[in-house]
Amino acid sequence: MNKATVEYLKRDRRLDPSKTAILVVDAQMSEFNDEARAAKPDYVARIETVAVPTMQKLMSAARPLGIEVVYTVIESLTKNGRDRSLDHKMSDIHVPKGSPLAKMIPGIEPKEDDIVLPKTSSGVFNSTNAAYVLRNLGIENLIVVGFLTDQCVDMTVRDGADLGFYMVCVSDGCTTHTQERHETALNAFGGYCRVQTAEEVIATFE
């Protein structure tokens, strides 16, 4: 193994914009509405005051460099959700096709030509053609933000790593129902990715 290969295998690589994408996981209105705020006020407050501003900062730095921003959203392909995974049916997770709850949170909406992949499982790579699309785009590095840290973000990071993508998780661009769960998840899947703040990730853009 030559020196160049050894350097390539380290987790501290700089991120070539032409080979890098931000994947926004389930940052949608089903997580950010009056009902959610009443049920989990601290969680929604972290979305509003930490995660969304962090995503905005990251996108503002990335888009001018040509870094792709790809979105995934929990949304059935049908109105009645008959296409959902067994787990989503058993967990009563259902956002009907075309529902306002599938829209992105204001301030981080997709641009006109961004890619949005609806999914009906925790892992985007299991219920969409995300891997196929990302490889067609020439993506090697995947920066993950979104919700929930210990569920859909976790699955995305682990599956992406197994599929050969270089995974980066933005710690302040994700959250879940409690801060303890958030921190536990980051520690648990940190072996599959590079966990950094948005500012630290931006500093590695070439």
Image (cartoon, grey):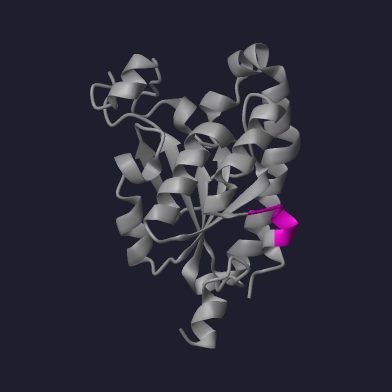
Quadrant of the image for the N terminus? Answer: bottom left
Q: Position of residue 202 (x, y in %)?
A: 69, 63
Task: Name the one closer to the observer, 67 or 101.
Answer: 67
Is 67 on the left-hand or right-hand side of 138? right
Say if residue 148 shows up in the picture: no
Residue at x-position 61% and y-position 72%: 14
Asked if residue 49 lies in the magenta stretch, the reply is: no
Q: Position of residue 21 (x, y in %)?
A: 50, 60
Residue 17 place in picture, x, y as percent? 55, 71
Say which of 200 and 116 sits in front: 200
Q: Quadrant of residue 108?
A: top right
Question: Which residue is at a point 67% across and 69% down the rendered structure image?
Answer: 204
For residue 205, above or below residue 123:
below
Q: Nearer the viewer, residue 117 or 176?
A: 176
How many discs mark residues in the rendered view? 0
Give x and y (percent) for residue 76.
Answer: 32, 29
Judge from the rendering whether residue 153 lies leftward or rightward of residue 46; answer left or right.
Answer: left
The quadrant in which the C terminus is found is bottom right
Q: Which residues are magenta?
A: 195-200
- Magenta segment: does it hold 198? yes
**Is any atom of residue 9 visible in this view?**
yes
Judge left or right: residue 84 versus residue 20: left
The residue most toward the front is 1
Q: Which of these two is toward me, 148 or 99?
A: 148
